[in-house]
Image (spheres, grey):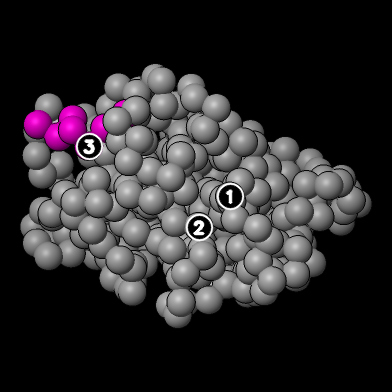
Amino acid sequence: MKSFLNVQDLGDLKQALAEAQEIKADRYKYDTLGKNKTLLMVFFNNSLRTRLSTQKAAMNLGMNVIVLDVNAGAWKLETERGVIMDGDKSEHLLEAIPVMGSYCDVIGIRSFAGLTDRDYDYAETVYNQFVQYSGKPVFAMETATVHPLQAFADLITIEENSPLPTSPKGEGTRLGTPSLGGDRGGLPKVVLTWAPHPKSLPQAVPNSFAQWMLAADVDFVITHPEGYELDPRFVAGAHVEYDQRKAFEGADFIYAKNWSCPGVTRPEDYGKILHDYHQMMHWTVDAEHMSWTNNAKFMHCLPVRRGMIVTDDVIEAPTSLVIPEAANREISATVVLKRILQG
Ligand code: CP
C-alpha cells in the first residue's frame, strides 16, 4: 500500500477487519517488521489521539518515529505555487517535502481543510503534494476531506459492539461481507447525526465515516439540518433523513459529529455555520434523543464539546463507546502501517 486515504485503499474490508482482530489479540505480533524503518508524522494541526495512537502503532511494529509539528519550531511553509515569497513564510512545501522524504520510510500527514477554498480542499492539495514529491508511502492522519484511521477504528468498534449475532457471511466477524446496497434487513442500524458546535469544523470525519459505513454491512442513515449535505463522492447511495427523531428510531449506534457547510448545493456557503448554534441546540444528543433508539451505543471521534454535541449523562453512560473507540485507533493504525511496511 503506497497511499491510505480512502476505504478502497485497504482492499477487502472483511480481511482488514480480521487483521484488526489479529493485531488486537497480539499487538506485537509483527514487532520486527519495522526494524530500521522510520515513520515521520507531520502535523500541520493539533492532535491528541492521532499523535499518540499512531506513534504507539509504529512502536508495536518496531519502527523509529519522528514527529514534526510544522507550526512549532519548523520554518513557516508556503503551500501555494506561483507566489512571490516576500511574507512570513520562509520555505516552500515543494522543497520541504522531498527533504522530509529523505529522512524516513513512511510519512503520515495531518493537514486540515482551510474551509475557504472548496476546490483546493477537496483536491487534497497538500496530501497529494506529499504523495507526488516525497518518494515515500503516505497515509492520512486527517486531511482536508478524510480521516480514514478514525473511520477504520469506528468500524472495528461497531463490529465489536454489534448487538446482532455473527453474520453467516462474516466467517467470524459480526458485520459480514462488505457490500453496497442490497437487503439491509437484520443489519445493525448506524446513524450519523449532525450536532451543534460554536466553531466552523471540517467535513473530514463525517465524509470518511459515511464512506466506510457504505462499504460495510450496516443499515446506514445520515441526519442533519438542510444545507449540510455532504459531498456525493462520499455519501452517494446513503439514506439521508432530515427528521432527526425519525432517523434515531431503531438505531443501534448513534455517531455524533458537527461539520460546517460542505457547499454542495451553495458553494458560496462552503465552510460556514448556517445557523446560530443557540438555535440548533435541539440537535444536541441527550437522554431523550437516545430514548428514541434501540438502546443505541453512543460514538464520537473526540475531542468532543460536552453540552454542545452530547450531554454529560449520555457520554458517561455505559452505552458510550467513546473510550474503546479511541483505543481502537492504535489497532487501525497498526494494521495500516503493517500493510504499508509489507508493501
Ligand atoms: N479523533 C482524533 O483524530 O483525535 P485527535 O484530533 O486528538 O488526533
Q: Magenta segment range? A: 279-286
Label 3 belongs to which residue?
Answer: 283
Q: Quadrant of the C terminus?
A: bottom right
Q: Residue at horizontal 70%, vertical 47%?
A: 331
Classify mark 2: residues with Cα within 10 Å, few (<14), some (14-19) or many (20+).
many
Secondary structure beneath disc 2?
Answer: loop
x and y percentages locating residue 2 in the rendered image: 64, 69
Q: Amino acid at mark 1?
A: Pro
Residue at the extreme bottom: 182
User: Can the viewer see residue 191?
Assistant: yes
**How many angstroms separate mark 1 from mark 3 (CA)?**
25 Å
Label 1 belongs to which residue?
Answer: 163
**Picture quadrant where residue 123 is located:** bottom left
Q: Residue at horizontal 67%, vertical 74%?
A: 169
Ligand 1 within 8 Å of disc 3? The answer is no
171 or 196: nearer the viewer: 171
Label 2 belongs to which residue?
Answer: 188
> Would residue 284 be counted in the magenta stretch?
yes
x and y percentages locating residue 109 in the rendered image: 52, 51
Q: Earlier in the sequence, mark 2 or mark 1?
A: 1
Secondary structure beneath disc 1?
Answer: loop
Q: Amino acid at mark 3?
A: Trp
Contact, mark 2 vs mark 1 (Cβ under 8 Å): yes
24 or 205: nearer the viewer: 24
**Picture quadrant where residue 273 is located:** top left
Q: Earlier in the sequence, mark 3 or mark 2?
A: 2
Q: Amino acid at mark 2?
A: Pro
User: Left of 143 or right of it: where is 165?
Assistant: right
x and y percentages locating residue 226 in the rendered image: 13, 54
